[in-house]
Image: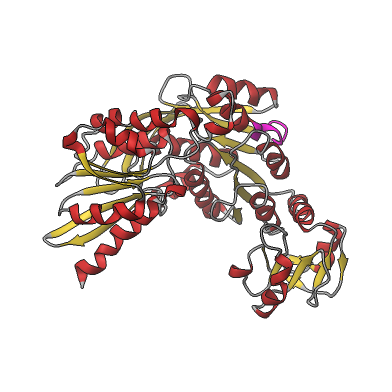
Amino acid sequence: MSSALWTAQEIAAATGGQVLADFEATGVSIDSRSIEPGDLFVALTGARDGHEFVVQTADKGAAGALISKPVAVPAVLVEDTFMALERLGVAARERAPQARRGAVTGSVGKTSVTRAVEAGLRRAGKAHASVKSYNNHIGVPLTLARMPRDTQRAVFEVGMNHADEIVPLSNFIRPHAVAITTVGPVHLENFADGEEGVARAKAEIFAGIEPNGVAVLNADNPWFGLLKAEAEAAGAQVWSFGTGEGVTAQLTVFAAGANGAEITAVVRGETLHFPILQTGVHWGLNSLCVLLMLEALDVDRETALASLAEFEPIEGRGAEKVVHVPGGTFTLVDESYNANPVSMQAALATLGARKVAGRRVVVLTDMLELGPMSARFHADLATPIAAAGIDLVFCAGPLMKSLWEALPPTRRGGYAENAAELAPQVASAMRSGDVVMVKGSNGSKAGAVAVALGALDLAGQG
């Protein structure tokens, strides 16, 4: 048996293609810009035709290509490269029947939970997982196609912003365990029936679940009953996590400190005390979701807890940086990857619970895809901001104008039409001892503010 991820003959057998010249690939890529030596380059056609870059990828060391138009490189020729990628993913799954597969979705926290589950799987043995947020109709089959034949456990992130997107992804993965972190008002503009539509779309994750598979569900979420019924109808066992009685894993104490938190929970009747490196209050429940997923994927409790104790916050999702300014330092909390009303409230509550030497400051950019209630969702943030004792609020974007107008003058730090214009206002206002959190939707460029604030460190140390 070849040690390669794929031989040309295996690719042809999986896709129904024709080998134009033999090769062996050690990876699979759809992006000519990040091609690695030994990769199979899949020439997808979209806004740009991947066939335009096939020769370029060969020059960078690609072993071969999957093509639907003749190109003078070692290749497998197929009718449709996207369908061929899907078939390659299915073949990768079928040739690794020993692999326990998990899938994670949810309105908030799916990437962080997927990464934390991955960390536990890697500690336990030969593991495979999605990279970045490869969670859509291309990312899921691509992740499967990259799965080595000797994989013991794998976890896949699954995303959506419309109904009927998750069903085919779940059928590709055929998961033994799935988790829905939570359901909230996200992508509402695409659902006529509002949040219930989002919940039903998330429940599509059960479509491909293996017989007697496990569904890990958030019992504190208002849609738990609907999700539980859908999971059981699909033949899944339901394992629940939450703060109330009668759950598989019950959170009883979340005690945040300067560099993490201590958690007390009752899991299957056993009281556990364990540390995590996260300070976000939502990580109390997230950690229990991770523990149950790891259990469902045959990772022992000791390994799971050791992995959680070392799992660090991800950039853009709570990672922190100490930034030097004249007279001292302030702390930057980077929550800029994405935002919706649920994650905003959790992040604000986390900041409010934190002990600070200076001020609590938030920099917020627009939350997108919230539909006709968008202005209301933004204005309503004034309540959790007040409850958290936030001292200063900076806002950017036309939607955040609704929050800006709802704030009392004493809390207004600054407003701008976009993130780029706001960044200098925030930078000039920072003082030693402040803790500043940056959060907003990816499309509203909250990350630009986080980058600008982080760059102040260079001036501070120069």
Q: Which residues are magenta?
A: 204-213
The residue depicted at 64 percent of the width and 35 percent of the height is 205
Q: Is residue 371 above or below residue 83?
A: above
Quadrant placement of the C terminus: bottom left
Does the rendering let one see residue 103? yes
**Is residue 445 toward the left or the right of residue 52 in the image?**
left
Closer to the camera, 56 or 401?
Answer: 401
Image position, residue 38 (x, y; %): 68, 73
The residue depicted at 36 percent of the width and 49 percent of the height is 418
Of all residues shown, which one is farthest toward the bottom? 59
Quadrant placement of the N terminus: bottom right
Q: Is residue 455 above or below residue 135?
A: below
Q: Quadrant of residue 146?
A: bottom right
Q: Quadrant of residue 145?
A: bottom right
Q: Is residue 227 above or below residue 174?
A: above
Q: Is residue 402 above or below residue 324?
A: above
**Is residue 196 toward the left or the right of residue 176 in the image?**
left
Image position, residue 11 (x, y; %): 81, 62
Queried whether the magenta region covers residue 202, the answer comes back as no
Closer to the camera, 6 or 430?
Answer: 430
The residue depicted at 25 percent of the width and 43 percent of the height is 257
